[in-house]
Image (cartoon, coloured by chain):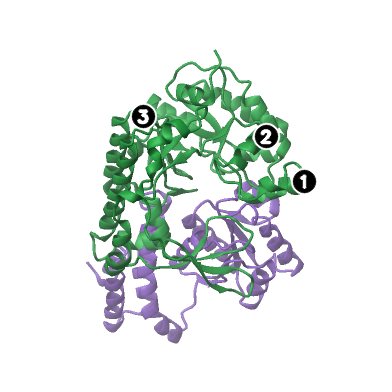
C-alpha cells in the first residue's frame, strides 16, 4: 500500500491503515531561515518571503525532506473590510517602531524581530467605537468570497491535505482589542457589548464559510486560528468562553459537517486543557498543538481523558531539534508511541525557532517517515 | 458588611468606580489610610491572587481587579505619603533587552502591588545595566526580569552577571519569569527564583523581602 500525503493524513485522522507516518511541519521563524541561509544550508532566496504553502515553502520541503506543511488552508476575505490603514506612527530612539495595525491597534515592534507584537493602545474600547468603526467593517457582501472557488477542486494540489480556513471566533477580536482591552470588555458597564461584537463578527465568518462551501469546493479539513491560551492556561475563563463563543463554533462546525468535513482543527497555543472539553463539545476535534512547551503538556493524557474523538496534530518537542541526535531519537520514539494510539500525526509544536539545527531537522524528517504503524 | 469588606468585594469584581468611591468614603469616615489599604484593597487582591493560582479566575479577572485597585490606590496615595507609610519592599521590574512584551510583566507588577510592595516599572527592552543601576539607586531588594522570547532569555544571565560585578548579590534577589524560561534555566543562569505564574512570583517576592529585612 502506497498512499499520497492527502490519503495518508485523512486515513490517519480516521483511524484507518496507512503505509507510514508523514513528515509534517508548521513552518519556521524567519530568523531561523536567515540563520540557515547564512550557514549555507539553504539558498538565500528561500530565507525571505517564505510563507506557509508558498512555492518557496515547497522548495524548502524538498531540500529538508518534509512531506508537507500542515498549514495549507484557504479562506475568504472574512475580516474587517476595509481594514484600518497600516501606518508607522513614530520611530522611537532605540529603533523600535510604533505603528497602527489593520485591526486599529497601536503596537510596538522591533525591526528584525518576528514575534507577537507588544500593544500600546487600541480603538475598540466602547459601544461608540464598535458602532462607528467596527460593525460597518464586519458586514457580509458576496464579493468577500472569490469567484475562483468554483474551480478550486481542479486547481488545488491533489496530493496534500488542504483545509478551509474558518476564521476565528475570539482570537481576531482579541487582536482588535488587545488582551487587556478584551478583559475590560468582558466586564464593561455595557454588558452586551462584547457579545454583540463576537456575534457580529461570527455571523460574517459563518456567511463567508457557507458561501465557499456552496461553490462545491471540497476540503480535507477545516481550521480555526485562535491563539487564545498561554503558558498558564486560557486568556479567557472557560465559563466566559463557553457563554460567548461555543455556539459560534457549533454553528460553523455543524455547517462543515453537513458538507462532509469532519476533521476540524483549531490553532490554540499554550495550556489548553480547560478549553478542550468545550471545543470537543462543539465539534472541534484537533487542538493544534497540544504543546509540550516548558510546561510539558502531552497528548496521551488528553486522549485517555477524552477518548478517540480527540484527534491530534503536533506534540513533538521542537527544542530537541536544537540539541542532538539522541534528543531527536527520544522524540521519535515518543512520537511512534503516540501515533500508535491512532488519530495522531506528529508535528513539531509550532514554528521552528532560531537555533534549530538544519541537519537534525533533516534527520527527523527522514526518520519519522520510516515509522510504520 | 463593613466598608472595608465592601472595598475588597468590589475590587474582586473589578468595579473600579465603586472601589474609588468606597475608598474615599472610608478615609472620610476616619479609617486610617493604612487600614484601608491593607484590609480593603490588599485583602481583595490577596483573594484574587489565591484564586488566580488555583485557576478559579483567569487573566481578565486579574486585570479588572488590578484596575480597580489602582483607582483605589490613587485616592490613598497622598494620605499614605503624608503619614509616611512604607511599602513592605521595593522591586524593579522589566522585560529584558530585545523584548517588547509586557503582558506577563504587567501581571506580575499588579500582583506585587497587590501584596503591598512598591514597584518601579522599567518597562520593556530593559538593558542589564538599567536593571542593576536602578536596584542600586532605588535601594530595591528585588529585580524581576521577564522574557517571552527564546532569543532574549539569555539577557537574564547578563543581569545576574552585572549584579555580581556591581557587588549587590548579597542584598538583591533576582527573579525571572516568562513563557520561554523554567526552573532549570533559572538555576543555569544563577538567578534566585523562577515562578511559573504571577501570583506565585508575588508570594516569592514577599518572602525575599522578609528574609532580607531580618
- Mark 1 Cα shell of 10 Å, populated few (<14), some (14-19), many (≥20): few
Question: Which structural element holds mark 1?
Answer: loop
Ranked by sequence position, the earlier of labels 3 and 2 is: 2
Residue on which disc 2 sits: A64
Can marks 3 and 2 be said to lie on one chain? yes
Q: x%, y% of residue A117? A: 52, 60
Q: How far is mark 2 from mark 1, CA to CA?
A: 15 Å
Q: Earlier in the sequence, mark 1 or mark 3?
A: 1
Rounded to the nearest angstrom, the CA distance separating label 1 from label 3 is 43 Å
Camera-side residue: A160 or A254? A160
Mark drawn on residue A39: 1
Give me the chain that's green.
A
Badge 2 marks a residue whose secondary structure is helix
Where does the N terminus of chain B fall, quadrant-wise? bottom left
**Mark 3 crowdedness (10 Å alpha carbons): few <14, some 14-19, many ≥20:** many
Name chain B's colour: purple
Please give the residue where the numbered disc 3 appears in the rendered image. A262
In contact (CB < 8 Å): disc 3 and disc 2: no
Amino acid at each position: 500500500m502506497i498512499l499520497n500525503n492527502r490519503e495518508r493524513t485523512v486515513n490517519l485522522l480516521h483511524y484507518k491503515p496507512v503505509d507510514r507516518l508523514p513528515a509534517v511541519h508548521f513552518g519556521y521563524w524567519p530568523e531561523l531561515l536567515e540563520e540557515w541561509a547564512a550557514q549555507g544550508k539553504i539558498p538565500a532566496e528561500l530565507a525571505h518571503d517564505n510563507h506557509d504553502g508558498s512555492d518557496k515553502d515547497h522548495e524548502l520541503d524538498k531540500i529538508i525532506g518534509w512531506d508537507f506543511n500542515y498549514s495549507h488552508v484557504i479562506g475568504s476575505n472574512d475580516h474587517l473590510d476595509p481594514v484600518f490603514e497600516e501606518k508607522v506612527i513614530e520611530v522611537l530612539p532605540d529603533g523600535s517602531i510604533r505603528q497602527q495595525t489593520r485591526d486599529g491597534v497601536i503596537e510596538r515592534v522591533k525591526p528584525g524581530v518576528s514575534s507577537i507584537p507588544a500593544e500600546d493602545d487600541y480603538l475598540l474600547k466602547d459601544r461608540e467605537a464598535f458602532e462607528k468603526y467596527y460593525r460597518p467593517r464586519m458586514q457580509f457582501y458576496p464579493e468577500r468570497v472569490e469567484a475562483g472557488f468554483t474551480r478550486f477542486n481542479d486547481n488545488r494540489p491533489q496530493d496534500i491535505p488542504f483545509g478551509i480556513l474558518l476564521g476565528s471566533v475570539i482570537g481576531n477580536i482579541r487582536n482588535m482589542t488587545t488582551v487587556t482591552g478584551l478583559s475590560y470588555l468582558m466586564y464593561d458597564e455595557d454588558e452586551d457589548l462584547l457579545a454583540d461584537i463576537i456575534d457580529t463578527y461570527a455571523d460574517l465568518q459563518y456567511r463567508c464559510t457557507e458561501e465557499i462551501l456552496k461553490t462545491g469546493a471540497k476540503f480535507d479539513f477545516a481550521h480555526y486560528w485562535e491563539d487564545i491560551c498561554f503558558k498558564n492556561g486560557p486568556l479567557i475563563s472557560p465559563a466566559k468562553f463557553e457563554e460567548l463563543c461555543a455556539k459560534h463554533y457549533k454553528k460553523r462546525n455543524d455547517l462543515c459537517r453537513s458538507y462532509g468535513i469532519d476533521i476540524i482543527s483549531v490553532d490554540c497555543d499554550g495550556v489548553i486543557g480547560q478549553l478542550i472539553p468545550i471545543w470537543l463539545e462543539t465539534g472541534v476535534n484537533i487542538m493544534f498543538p497540544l504543546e509540550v512547551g516548558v510546561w510539558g503538556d502531552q497528548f496521551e493524557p488528553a486522549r485517555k481523558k477524552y477518548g478517540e474523538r480527540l484527534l491530534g496534530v503536533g506534540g513533538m518537542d521542537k527544542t530537541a531539534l536544537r540539541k542532538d541526535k539522541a534528543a531527536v531519537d527520544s522524540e521519535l520514539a515518543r512520537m511512534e508511541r503516540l501515533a500508535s494510539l491512532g488519530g495522531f500525526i506528529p508535528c513539531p509544536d509550532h514554528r521552528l525557532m532560531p537555533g534549530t539545527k538544519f541537519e537534525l531537522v533533516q534527520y527527523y524528517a527522514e526518520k519519522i517517515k520510516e515509522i510504520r504503524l | 458588611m463593613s466598608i472595608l469588606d465592601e472595598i475588597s468585594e468590589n475590587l474582586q469584581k473589578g468595579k473600579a468606580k465603586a472601589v474609588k468611591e468606597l475608598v474615599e468614603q472610608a478615609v472620610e469616615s476616619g479609617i486610617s489610610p493604612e487600614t484601608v489599604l491593607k484590609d480593603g484593597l490588599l485583602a481583595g487582591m490577596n483573594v484574587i491572587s489565591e484564586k488566580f493560582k488555583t485557576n478559579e479566575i483567569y487573566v481578565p479577572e486579574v486585570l479588572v481587579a488590578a484596575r480597580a485597585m489602582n483607582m483605589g490606590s490613587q485616592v490613598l496615595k497622598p494620605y499614605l505619603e503624608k503619614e509616611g507609610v512604607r511599602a513592605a519592599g521595593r522591586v524593579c521590574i522589566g522585560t529584558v533587552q530585545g523584548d517588547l512584551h509586557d503582558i506577563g510583566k504587567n501581571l506580575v507588577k499588579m500582583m506585587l502591588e497587590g501584596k503591598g510592595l512598591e514597584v518601579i516599572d522599567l518597562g520593556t527592552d530593559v538593558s542589564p545595566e538599567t536593571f542593576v543601576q536602578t536596584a542600586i539607586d532605588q535601594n530595591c531588594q528585588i529585580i524581576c526580569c521577564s522574557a517571552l522570547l527564546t532569543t532574549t532569555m539569555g539577557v537574564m544571565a547578563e543581569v545576574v552577571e552585572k549584579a555580581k560585578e556591581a557587588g549587590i548579590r548579597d542584598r538583591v534577589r533576582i527573579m525571572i519569569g516568562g513563557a520561554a524560561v523554567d526552573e532549570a534555566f533559572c538555576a543555569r543562569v544563577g538567578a534566585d527564583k523562577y515562578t511559573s505564574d504571577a501570583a506565585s512570583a508575588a508570594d516569592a517576592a514577599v518572602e525575599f523581602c522578609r528574609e532580607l529585612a531580618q
